[in-house]
Amino acid sequence: MKKWYEELFENYAETYETEVYTKGTIGEIDFIEKEIKHDKSKKILDIGCGTGRHSIELAKRGYNVTGIDLSECMLEMAKQKAKEAKVKVEFIKADARYLKFEKEFDLALIICEGGFCLMETDEMNYMVLQSASRSLKQEGKLILNTLNGLFPLFHSVKDFINSNSVDGKSQENTFDLMTFREKSIIEVTDDDGNIKKIKCDERYYVPSEITWLLKSLGFKKVDIYGCKLGAFSRDDKLTNEDYQMLVIAEY
């Protein structure tokens, strides 16, 4: 039986390209370039690369990039887009929990929830971070964004659920304060016009928790900021109003 995230991204590449959260690529890559000081010798791993929007933009700017994803249709779109852009990116179908890289990359990206926080258990989510850590060189850096647990804590659960629903209808949304998991049913239309109902299960994290997880993997410095679409910045202090947080971890 397919997992909910596999079902969601099956036959979804063209629709994915139209989603509002895919429109901030240029600004996000501008920030990522600053973080690696525009050093073209840096080797970059894009975990959960989707249709390759970050990988391809980085390749256009002269970086060596490898993109991995679990969805065949997303990877096919990524390969086609790279060909059209006349850039070389190595795209690989792989599970983010079981990457076979060992100290090969200077930078790992898990952007737009590229696998992390989508897994069914906390242990599986941790395995995604382990894979990313294992893939990095001794002086490597990890940049990720993830759901901010402070948001539903600060807002009442009722208001939080309603804010994530359509026209104020809950669509069977629930948020469990014991597990920090939001379970919901969303309705999506795939690339062939078929309507699918997906049972989502996403994990929110609070800053102290994500800091502890990353430090347990050997990262010495973990910085956390608010996360704004297309405008990542170290100037944005994380607040209770940020739906996502931007995390930068360094050895």
Image (cartoon, rainbow, N blue to C red):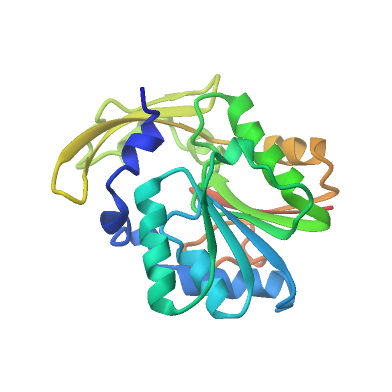
Residue drawn at (38%, 36%) of the image: 6
Quadrant hosting residue 170: top left
Q: Is residue 118 left or right of residue 76?
A: right
The number of numbered discs placed on residues in the rendered structure image is: 0
Expressed as whole percent of the image width and height from the top left, the position of residue 83 reads 41, 73
Residue drawn at (28%, 38%) of the image: 165
Quadrant hosting residue 189: top left
Expressed as whole percent of the image width and height from the top left, the position of residue 210 reads 68, 39
**Residue placed most toward the observer, 6 or 206:** 6
Q: Give the residue furthest to the left.
A: 193
Q: Is residue 171 left or right of residue 230?
A: left
Residue drawn at (64%, 70%) of the image: 64
In the picture shown, does residue 74 fall above or below 40?
Answer: above
Query: Residue 4: in sight, yes or no?
Result: yes
Residue drawn at (41%, 62%) of the image: 78
**Residue placed most toward the observer, 251 or 178:** 251
**Residue placed most toward the observer, 232 or 122:** 122
In the picture shown, does residue 207 fall above or below 120?
Answer: below
Expressed as whole percent of the image width and height from the top left, the position of residue 105 reads 73, 58
Quadrant hosting residue 164: top left
Expressed as whole percent of the image width and height from the top left, the position of residue 23 reads 39, 67
Q: Give the residue furthest to the top.
A: 178
Query: Residue 164: in sight, yes or no?
Result: no
Q: Quadrant of the N terminus?
A: top left
